[in-house]
Image (cartoon, rainbow, N blue to C red):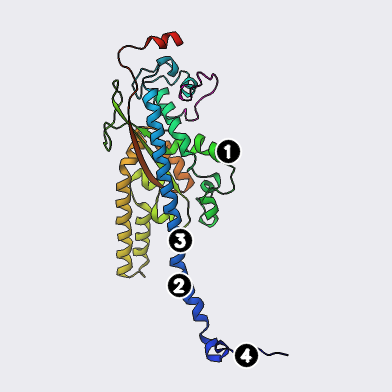
């Protein structure tokens, strides 16, 4: 029988030190694995930025024709007014107007709980549809509260059918995580509630993107309680726990408080977007409560688009009365 020639690793000395290779592999693999997860999360956030920018363009294109449109399509809401009432009218007519299909009796908008009148609801609907592509799946939302059940599959949609994910995003999640506002000018933090004919209309979309990649989502994003209150409570609790333990070195305590400062700066940068969430969308407190219940982590993404209003100005066009 042919006998295998001994190799250098078969010596007793090498057998004693061979386990060091596996230890070194584990030490090097963990940071590399976290880096790969971070790259995946950044890639998902970058794609979400593109989708939010598209949603802002859709909101602007919708707004420039919805605001000057005939009042009876929007339950009597006045022209060129953002929060002009009329939510009790026929929002389906506004939906039909957006798609050039006329009135569609009996069909309501999926975000009827949004603040503002029927015109703003129609504009929110236009922004809502692109964002359904980046809204979290049901599996992703239900596993947030249990880190042991989180997975990369859930972070990219899981096994949910596209139709079910569209329904969840358009009907539920996006209604709480989406705001559409109209600043005075690009990059401005003051907002308009009315327009004149041929004004430059800027539509801004603010969206709470759900960070679903395990481990790194807590590093790159914040939970709903922190975002809505502006308080880095999670990092403060970790720093306090380190101080109370009595077994933490001064360097580790300093690192923990540096983490608190980084989180505070991140929340401060997200504050303008969270203020806009209070300007438009579902009830601010209700949105915060619903998102906090999921236990998820989120990042505020904002984008805007500017287009000229398409109204002719002057009195209500006679065509509005003829079409009625």
| Residue indicated by mark 4 | 5
Contact (Cβ within 8 Å) of mark 4 with mark 3: no
Contact (Cβ within 8 Å) of mark 1 with mark 3: no
Q: Going 38% across and 9% down the picture, which residue do you hit?
A: 318
- Dot placed on the residue nearer the N-terminal end, 4 or 1: 4
Residue 280 visible somewhere in the drawing: yes
Where residue 54 appears, as percent x and y from the top left, is 41, 38
* Range shown magenta: 97-112
Mostly what secondary structure, the magenta segment?
Answer: loop
- Picture layout, residue 250 above or below residue 41: below
Where residue 121 appears, as percent x and y from the top left, is 43, 27
Contact (Cβ within 8 Å) of mark 2 with mark 4: no
Instruction: Tell me the crowding category of disc 4: few under 14, some 14 to 19, or many 20 or more residues within 10 angstroms, Cα based.
Output: few
- Dot placed on the residue nearer the N-terminal end, 1 or 3: 3
| Residue indicated by mark 1 | 163
| Residue indicated by mark 3 | 36
- Picture layout, residue 197 above or below residue 11: above
Residue mark closest to the camera, 2 vs 4: 4
Disc 2, SS: helix
| Residue indicated by mark 2 | 27
Instruction: Tell me the crowding category of disc 2: few under 14, some 14 to 19, or many 20 or more residues within 10 angstroms, Cα based.
Output: few
Of the pair 8 and 80, the residue shown nearer to us = 8
Disc 3, SS: helix
Residue 324 visible somewhere in the drawing: no
């Amino acid at each position: 029988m042919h006998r295998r020639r001994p190799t250098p690793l078969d010596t007793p000395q090498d057998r004693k030190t061979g386990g060091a290779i596996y230890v070194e592999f584990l030490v090097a693999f963990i940071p590399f694995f976290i880096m790969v997860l971070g790259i995946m999360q950044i890639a998902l956030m970058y794609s979400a930025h593109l989708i939010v920018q598209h949603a802002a363009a859709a909101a602007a294109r919708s707004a420039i024709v919805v605001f000057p449109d005939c009042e009876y399509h929007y339950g009597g809401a006045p022209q060129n007014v953002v929060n002009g009432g009329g939510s009790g009218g026929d929002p389906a007519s506004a939906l039909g107007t957006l798609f050039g299909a006329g009135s569609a009796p009996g069909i309501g908008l999926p975000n009827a709980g949004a603040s503002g009148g029927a015109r703003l609801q129609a504009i929110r609907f236009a922004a809502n549809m692109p964002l359904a592509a980046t809204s979290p799946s049901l599996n992703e939302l239900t596993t947030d509260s249990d880190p042991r059940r989180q997975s990369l599959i859930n972070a990219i949609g899981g096994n949910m059918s596209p139709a079910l994910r569209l329904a969840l995003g358009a009907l539920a999640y996006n209604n709480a995580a989406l705001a559409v506002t109209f600043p005075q000018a690009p990059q401005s933090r003051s907002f308009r509630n009315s327009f004149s004919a041929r004004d430059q209309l800027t539509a801004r979309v603010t969206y709470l993107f759900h960070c679903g990649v395990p481990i790194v989502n807590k590093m790159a994003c914040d939970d709903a309680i922190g975002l809505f209150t502006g308080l880095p409570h999670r990092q403060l609790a970790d720093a306090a726990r380190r101080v109370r333990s009595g077994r933490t070195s001064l360097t580790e305590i300093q690192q923990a408080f540096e983490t608190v400062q980084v989180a505070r700066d991140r929340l401060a940068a997200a504050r303008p977007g969270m203020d806009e969430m209070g300007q438009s969308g579902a009830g601010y407190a209700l949105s915060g409560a619903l998102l906090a219940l999921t236990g998820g982590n989120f990042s505020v993404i904002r984008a805007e688009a500017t287009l000229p209003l398409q109204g002719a100005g002057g009195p209500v066009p006679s065509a509005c009365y003829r079409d009625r």
